[in-house]
Image: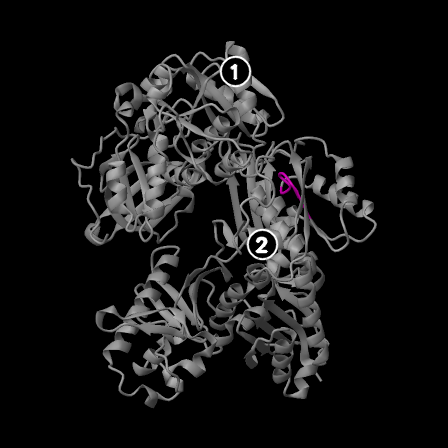
Amino acid sequence: MRGPVGTRMRELSREDLKDIAAGAALLGTGGGGNPYLGRLVVEGVLTSGRRIRVAEADDLDCDTPVAAMFGLGAPTVGIEKIRSGTEALTALRALERYVGRPFQAIAPIEMGGSNSMIPLALGALTDLPVLDLDGMGRAFPEVQMVTYSVYGIPAGPMAVADERGNVAVMEARDDRFMERMARAVTVVQGGHADAVGYPATAARFWAAGIPGTLTLAASIGRVLRRARPVLPALLPLVRGGIVFEGKISDLNRRTVGGFTRGEAILTGTGTDGGQTARLVFQNENLGLFVGERPVVTVPDLITLLDYESSAPLTTEVLRYGFRVRVLAMPCHDLWRSPAALAVAGPRAFGYDFDFEPWDAFASAGRMPDDT
Amino acid sequence: MASPGVMWRVGIDVGGTNTDAVLLDEAGALRGQEKTPTTPDVAGGIKTALQTLMADPLYQERVGLVMLGTTHCTNAVIERRGLLPVAVLRLGAPASTAVPPLTDWPSDLAAALDPRVGILAGGAEFDGREISALDEEGIRRFARALEPGRAVAVVSIFAPVADAHERRAEALIRETADFPVVVSRSAAIGSIGLLERENATILNAALGAVIARAVDGFTAAVHDVGLKARTYLTQNDGTLLDLPRARRYPIFTIASGPTNSLRGAAYLTGLQDAIVVDVGGTTTDVGVLAAGFPREASATVELGGVRTNFRMPDLLSLGLGGGSRIHGRGEAVSVGPDSVGYALTRRARVFGGPEWTASDAAVACGRTAFGEAAHLSGWEMSIPAAALRRADAMMAEAVERMRLKPGPVAVIAVGGGAFLVPDNLVDVTRVHRPSGGEVANAIGAAIAEVSGEVDRVYSLDGRSREEVLRAAETEALEQAVAAGANPDGVRIVDREDLPLAYLPGSATRIRVKAVGPLAGPGGYAHA
């Protein structure tokens, strides 16, 4: 990304888009879906001579009206019924009619998969700036698992639109119910839809969102693309550490209630020789245990890296025999409050263990010997 | 004179460097094998190999089946040669218009197709509902703009669930154009994943002329040698395409070579589950046999720079082969990835050439014997020893990475450079080195069977998962029999069901594959 020029907000290049997609794959902690199609949609919008501007906190007035944009639905539908590119615009205009005024900036909600890309397309289409933040700092499977909800920006009113111009604007008593209604509408609309919601001022977004994540994703992508070896450049950038190194010696993956749940057993290699680690996941990686001891737990970030290339691996591609390193990264402090952990801590995912905060200095995180 | 119903079969594998051919008798025993350089016209090499195999005039009458595996189509895509101009018709507007056909293709490959593109209303939702009504008038306009010689690819959203719009579009195009039009429909070619299935369909359309030349050349070579045999091409899942079907689905012949090697290795050893290491002159392909068939890649497969999602064997390729050059000295000795390739018998030291290769190291260390060991005298022994250690470590790592589960596994070493596979691999029961392994690819072609496959999203709606699975299995078995399989030998070899995340529990993607030996003369089961 270019630095700010005078008072002008900086613009994203095509190279930045590739880097953000690659960085979001790492922050996606094994889930989040594939950002590839999302990137093609954004690049398609850019060929028509449009631009994507990124806003930092001091680029906008505090009371600038902002809404968050994200895709909803089944990834399998998303790769078959590709967007028309108008869905998000339909939702945005419907919400503007409902609240009675135009929005002046767009906020991403998730830094993983297509949702790291699609808000940029809406920003380009409308020439509205996109805030350099998001509501997860990673990927999560449900709408209420977002810091906007935790810190006082309700999801509603929310508009959900398909490619034909069908749009529903909904209000709900709470964000969990909003999630259920939005999913139902999405199914009627064909299993995949775009949503615009969380209407609030810029000031409230900066208070309730995780700042700097677009820039972070771009920086991670740049490191993955350019740095050799990768890890010495990557670890300081994400304040992360390698907490285990090993080989996948067992893999149990099943689909329960629409989610891919399961666990992988890692047999330690190198300095972890003789030890066994267990990784539990539900679309995203949610906990790493060495023996019975929880080492890293959600909402802290756990990403498996290919041993050779340090490329991030999604839960879908994992296979017996993969040699991996486990990268741990601390989540943003916004996720570590009791209110936030109630929404996105281990117990919120049905696990019977508590959050164990991880950080690079206090734990066994270390640089691998051979990098 | 052969007794009626007892037939021998010939398997041919045309690779970039060599054309391999084998002759199997009615009991499946190897009666002859031949390796000859691939000729630019391909048919010449096939004819030479066939003539050598038919040295005994009695053989000619006994051959009832000739199976060909060929890299024609793979090479045409990679080299962008002989491709037809293509018109792409996508049905699904307004959905999908954000990413038009041929997005993200290498520009030289896209240009080679001189593409015309239309996105019209039509297509289905995941549950089979229409996205919008089919734009029949638009399709007629699209057809009127076609010129003779341009192939057409028709791709409708969720065609693997509901392909009525693709069929209707094909009929409309044929009745509107004033000349014959060849139409490739996506539902017959790929599974869920619009762009990847569309890419495969476009490549299939573009390969129409390449496959026609290959089939014509093959037919002519078989005829010229005087064989009166049924002829087939092999596809990338290790099963057969009859020639009319091969002409319609050339894309399925892509990557049939590595599949044939894996199948040949299974046949030669009788093993159904094993890791197969196929060592050539420049590269080594490591694949996995599961129940006698290649394990398929789960991820997207790139072909000539284009993403596709059709089934390919899961392979790990190493830049290591019999012709790999040796570099450096002492601890810094390395092997490959550069190679003297097909010039091994001229360039390698052991054959009197100027270059040190992996083959020289293997001969120097006594792992195999060919050429003139005297040419290696004066070589400081630490270098070949270190080179072999390096090569062994690469092989061991590759075998490790392809394992499916813990516990001991069998390894089958095939290909001309099989001697590079070390015996002492960790957690390996035994390294099998079958005789005939250097032509495992041609043997794989000779023993290929017939398949039927169903890969579709089903709505469970009041039916149990088991009922739907059974229905899919019946359909796959019927397809295999319709394609020529013996109803008595047909069986299910692969079964997978995958509920769609985030959708109500009713939608499930089911994939079932049935396989059986060819019915009729020469169609024997081998497993």
Residue A35 quadrant: top left
Q: Which residue is mark 2?
A: B109
Q: Which residue is mark 1?
A: A95
**Position of residue B518 measured from the top left corner of the image (x, y, whole percent):** 65, 65
SS for dot 2: helix
Magenta residue span: B153-160
Which quadrant would the N terminus of chain B be assigned to in this image?
Answer: bottom right
The residue shown at (71%, 78%) is B227
Question: Which class describes the residues within 10 Å of circle 1: few (<14), some (14-19), or many (20+)?
Answer: many
Residue B326 quadrant: bottom left
Amino acid on which disc 1 is placed: Leu
Using the image as rendered, state which of residue B361 and residue A340 is in the foreground. B361
**Position of residue B152 measured from the top left corner of the image (x, y, whole percent):** 70, 49
Say if the magenta span includes residue A101: no
Question: Which class describes the residues within 10 Å of circle 2: few (<14), some (14-19), or many (20+)?
Answer: many
Does residue B437 appear left or right of residue A290 in this picture? right
Q: Where is B32 relative to A101, above or below?
A: below
Q: Is residue B14 visible?
A: yes
Q: Where is B183 relative to B315, above or below?
A: above
Q: Where is B278 relative to A159, above or below?
A: below
The residue shown at (82%, 52%) is B179
To which chain does the residue with label 2 belong?
B
The residue shown at (36%, 21%) is A59
